[in-house]
Amino acid sequence: MKIIAGNSNRPLAIAVAQNLGIPLAHASIRRFADMEVFVEIFENMRGEDAFIIQPTSFPTNDSLMELLITIDTLRRSSSHRITAVIPYYGYGRQDRKTGPRTPITAKLVANLITVAGADRVLTMDLHAGQIQGFFDIPLDNLFVAPVFVRDIRDRMAANHYSQENLTIVSPDVGGVVRARALAKRLEAGLAIIDKRREKAGESEVMNIVGKVKGRDCIMFDDIADSAGTLCNAAEAMLNAGAKSVSAYVTHGVFSGQAVDRIEKSALVNLTVTDSIMATPAVIASPKIRQLSIAPLLAEAISRISQERSVSSLFS
């Protein structure tokens, strides 16, 4: 097995390699003067089971090109199998036509990864389940829920919260299945925010479906981009009588003024994974916490390499 780190989230790749007990492959991903990407691997890759770890986060296009060129490099190096480990799948929100003459870019990216030479893909909490069907190669979609469940239980015990007083909240209708799965694991209540999104990046809370009055509420979502939805929903729940509101999000995109918006919001805290490398602003924020998914990715990579079940991780 060989682990190759892209530049998008090298700390995560290092942590995964440490969990697997192997060093990262000696490779270089650099730019020419005109910013073309050049990849060079300094180890023999012939017949190896290669895993390239590269979330396609900001700068999305650069991260994607690095991934594609690294896959092509491994294919031309005669690697036995190439697995693209993409903790955060960029362009995943463009999973359907939202209007006339609009693209389905999530499908285009799937085609690019396949044509580049990847044999399989390992990702986590895809924005939409149908993206799995965009690939003509095997794809394993990991779920972060077990990581969040352990952390929520630990924090509830530390802060003497009552599990009977806990409500898991989906910040929109599209995330109900995800939130229901977390609520079931925690044996907690479920609430849903009914919102209207007039345009990308802006949302307005309309109604709260479910009991939140006097309860500790935890919102669960896959992506925090502008964080407007989370902050608006937190304020609405407090106005509806919620005792406290916090949030757990898989992918912390945090574009624009998102961090500042979170710090000024009614959220007690927001917990994200390290699927996307944290910026200095995220690291410095007193309200944002990070949980590592390196052990989960490492176990999944080990199981893929050994031809063992990945789905049983979540049984």
Image (tube, rainbow, N blue to C red):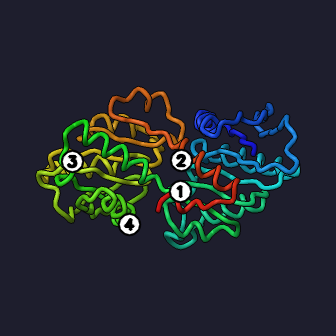
For marks 2 and 3, give the one nearer the viewer.
2
Image disc number at residue 142: 1
Label 2 Cα neighbours within 10 Å, binned few <14 / some 14-19 / many ≥20: some
Q: Amino acid at mark 3?
A: Glu
Tally of numbered tags: 4
Q: Closest to the observer: 310 or 130? A: 310
Q: Amino acid at mark 4?
A: Val
Q: Which residue is mark 4?
A: 177
Q: Amino acid at mark 2?
A: Leu
Q: Amino acid at mark 1?
A: Leu
Name which quarter of the figure residue 53 lies in. Answer: top right
Would you place residue 58 above or below residue 123 in this image?
A: above
Tell me the CA gap for discs 2 and 1.
8 Å
Which element carries disc 4, helix, strand or loop?
helix
Q: Which residue is mark 3?
A: 235
Q: Closest to the observer: 126 or 103? A: 126
Q: Closest to the observer: 155 or 219? A: 155
> Looking at the image, do the residues carrying marks 2 and 1 touch, with CB atoms under 8 Å apart?
yes
Which element carries disc 3, helix, strand or loop?
helix
Q: Closest to the observer: 234 or 32? A: 234
